[in-house]
Amino acid sequence: MFAFVRQFPLYIMVSVVAGVPLLLAIFLAVQHTINLNTQSHQALKDKQLVTLITHYDNLAHNLAVERGLTAGVLGSQGKTEIVQKLTQQRKKVDDAINSLVQLNTPLISSSDSYDLLQDVQVQLNRLNQVRQGVDRLSPQIAPFGYYSNLNQLIIDNIDVLIAQTQSRELGTLGDALISVIVMKERAGQARGALNGVFAKGSATSVLFSNIEGYIQSGDYASRKAQIAFPEQYRQSLQSHQSNPAWKKVEQVQQSFLNQSANLDSIQGPQATEWFPMATERIGLMNQLRNQMVDQMLSAAERSAQQATLNRNLLMAATAVISLLMIMMVWGLVASLQSRVGRLKQTLRSMSEHHDMTVELDSRGKDEIASISNSINALISNFRKLLFDVTKTNNESSNRLQNIVESAQDLDSSSRSTIAKCDNIATAMTELAQSSVEIAQSAERAMGDTTTMNNKVVDCQTQSELSYRSVQSLLEQINATEQCMAELANDTQSIGQIVETINSVSEQTNLLALNAAIEAARAGEHGRGFAVVSSEVRDLAQRSQEATENISKLLDQIGEKTRFSVESMAKSKQASDDTFESVQQVNESVSLLESSIEHVNNHISTITHSTIEQSKACEAIDQDIDVLASIAHKTGQHADDLNQIVSGYQAEAMELKHQLSAFKLA
């Protein structure tokens, strides 16, 4: 499939891919427009159906009024007042008939509309005959039955018309309207029949039974209306049923039904009172009917307008969007064809003229712009590659020339190498002889260093003995210094004790003085105590003198002790210096021993190296022979390399010629 698609230009495939969905969308939009047009047509048809239903109901309403007045005329035997009202009502009926016949309903099926109207028209053709019989007060056709049958036929037509509507709202309102019309019809039948009864003052059992059936049928229709009515109309009906006029009519009807045993003398209002009363009640029902008809007309009109608006909006939107889409597809296809054409032409020109300076138009963010941008990047990379290849080829040519020159130099160098190898062989022979002499001198030096090493070992032994002696002396000096420090501390402790004794002596002397004073005061009795205190004072004086002598002695001992401590510190410092010097001497001797050992190792290494050097000289002499052979071969290879590089130079020139065919700048 994809191979088949590739047989056509891209703009044709885009046109097909974009055009088919567009045509399908236009087809669906047209189909939806047709559906909306059908809905609009049905909405307008519903509107005409409601209008036709209104005309039928208006005719039925006026026929019901005429029926009631006819019953009143017959019951009253041609009472003038009732006859005048009947004449006026007949004109209204004739107007309603003319309005129904002249009504134009082009959207309703002519056959259905004609059949319904034809059935009514057949009955209306007998209307003048019925009226003439009523005017003569001797009707050949029962007026009440005629009007009732005609209204029932109209109600059936209304029911058929309501069934033709497609609107759910209109269907619901139509069912409610049928209930109201039936209620009106039954109320009208009861009004007409009772109008005749009240005008005559009596009724037959058959008439009573019929009136009872009208009233019961009206109650059934009222119950059905309560069920079928929308909430707003149900509330309106309940409000009307609470109206005094409505209740008064029901009371009169119930009063009539209660007189079933006294039909020859019916009690009730006058016919002239009853008919307006019943008409007022029917007028309340007619208000409900008018509200429903108005809402049905409004709903039909609103539905028709909405359907027409939706159809027109869809048609306009379809036309505008289709035009925009067609223009957009056309523009995109034209742009695609133009851009792809320019792209093909540019690439063809680049291929034919090897022009790498061309740059494609990459403006935009679509796939073609992306392809152009990628091709521009590819051209740029290819142009850079060609630049690099050209540059590399030029550099390769230069390098090949350098290789040729190097090969020539290599050939010349190989010849020089052969000559130098001969010189090196001679020099290596002399070097081998010198190596033997160096090895002999190194053996003699090794004997001298061995003797020196033995003397250094003896010196190191004496140095270690001195090191141990100085170390022992340093330990004894440290111990003496510690003892002198302890002696100084003991001297200080003795001084403190002497000070304590001196203080006690002073206190004792003071006490003896106080005792002498007290003895002098005592007179003769204190003479013995005075002698004792004098002796005590003498003892204290001698103790104080002794402590002073001890203090002086301690000061001399402390001074000598401090001098001894200082002397010991100096001796310790001198011992430390001696110890450090001995240690340094010991370390120097160790270093000297190590150095002599290193020198001995070096001499041994030199001896070994000279031997190895002699052997290496022999090997080098052999290698030089090999090197000379290699130099000969190198010269031959240099000639071969020169020929190969010449071939590479020819190929590089051919590549340069081919690269020059591309336009890079």
Image (tube, rainbow, N blue to C red):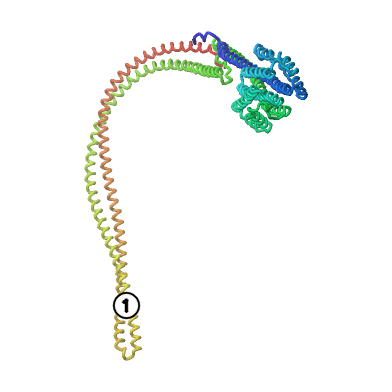
Q: Residue at x 28, y 48 (%)?
A: 585
* Closer-to-camera residue (378/661): 378
Q: Which residue is mark 1?
A: 505
Number of numbered tags placed on the structure image: 1
Which percent across, then down, holds residue 255? 65, 30
Quadrant including the C terminus = top right
Q: Residue at x 41, y 13 (%)?
A: 642
Q: Residue at x 32, y 22 (%)?
A: 424
Residue 73 showing in the rendered view:
yes
- Going by the numbered disc 1, the residue's amino acid type is Ser
Q: Is residue 376 left or right of residue 589?
A: right
* Closer-to-camera residue (210/147): 210
* Closer-to-camera residue (193/650): 193
Which percent across, then down, holds residue 578? 28, 53
Which percent across, then down, holds residue 315? 64, 17
Q: Is residue 554 above or below residue 261?
A: below
Q: Residue at x 43, y 16 (%)?
A: 405
- Please, what secondary structure does the residue beneath circle 1 have? helix
Label 1 CA crowd tier, 10 Å (few <14, some 14–19, many 20+): many
Q: Is residue 91 above or below residue 533?
A: above
Q: Is residue 167 left or right of residue 515?
A: right
